Amino acid sequence: MESSNINIAAIRKDYTLKSFSESDLLKNPFEQFRVWFTEAIHAEVNEPNAMTLATVKPELEDDCFVFFTNYSSNKGQQIGVNNKVALVFFWPELERQVRIEGIAEKLEEYKSDDYFKSRPMSSQIGAHASPQSLEIENRQYLEDLVVKMEELFSDQPIVRPNFWGGFKVIAHSFEFWQGRSSRLHDRFIFRKSNNEWLRKRLAP
């Protein structure tokens, strides 16, 4: 079908699944995120812990979000230049989105080591083999690198490469979005001020 036959302006969805009011809102955005995240898991959302910034799915710690990637990748280098980042979780099955803004810092090495050890062997090999974000000739080039790494580590433990590890995002802003009918969505923003989270409703 040609795009000229599609009325793009008429493509819209009316969100009617849930509401989100002041009385539902928790005082701490991390706790609010945990509630929504748990609901996303129970609703069997496809990969509820996938977010737009991370290539490897993030974890939620007490006061930050953690994700793992190749430090030499485009993403890793961009964070090195400007560590102000935004994370977006979108759960269409629940008609919800959460946007988090914060500062990205490299995770402590021992935590990156622990996480790397917990990964399947194939993923450990993949971290060593992939020159993430670099141009490669073809698929065979990548598969040859995998074979080379498998041979290298055939008789020794697979250690975390120093170019791969975690970032932690120290959040200073959360926006919770709940889709509502007629585009009158519920939006609440948390901003941190003097170690206290201040909450406000935003117009849709």
Image (spheres, rainbow, N blue to C red):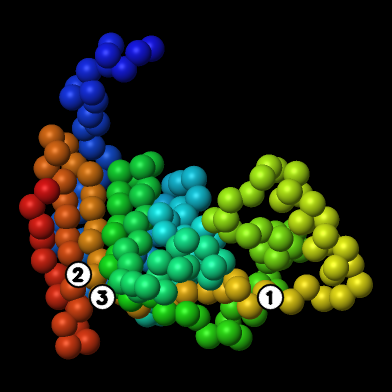
- Where is residue 157? Give x, y as percent: 82, 76
In terms of image quadrants, where is residue 165?
A: bottom right
Q: Is residue 136 above or below residue 130?
A: above
Would you say 191 lies left or right of 120 here? left
Q: Earlier in the sequence, mark 3 or mark 1?
A: 1
At label 2, the amino acid type is: Phe
On residue 61, the disc is none
- Residue type beneath disc 1: Arg
Whether residue 36 can be seen here: no
Secondary structure of the residue carrying numbered label 3: strand
Residue bearing the label numbered 1: 160
Q: Which mark is residue 190?
A: 2
Q: Whole-Å distance between the Cαs marked 3 and 2? A: 8 Å
Relative depth, front residue between 157 and 138: 138
Image point 22% across, 87% down: which residue?
Answer: 195
Q: CA distance from mark 1 to mark 2?
A: 36 Å
Question: Element at badge 1?
Answer: loop
Label 3 vs 2, first from the N-terminus: 3
Check if mark 1's residue and mark 2's residue have beta carbons within 8 Å. Answer: no
Q: In the rendered structure, which amino acid carries the disc numbered 3?
A: His
Q: Which quadrant is the N terminus positioned in? A: top left
Q: Examine the rendered structure and indicate whether residue 192 appears above or below residue 124.
A: below
Give the Cα distance between marks 3 and 1: 30 Å
- The label shown at residue 172 is 3
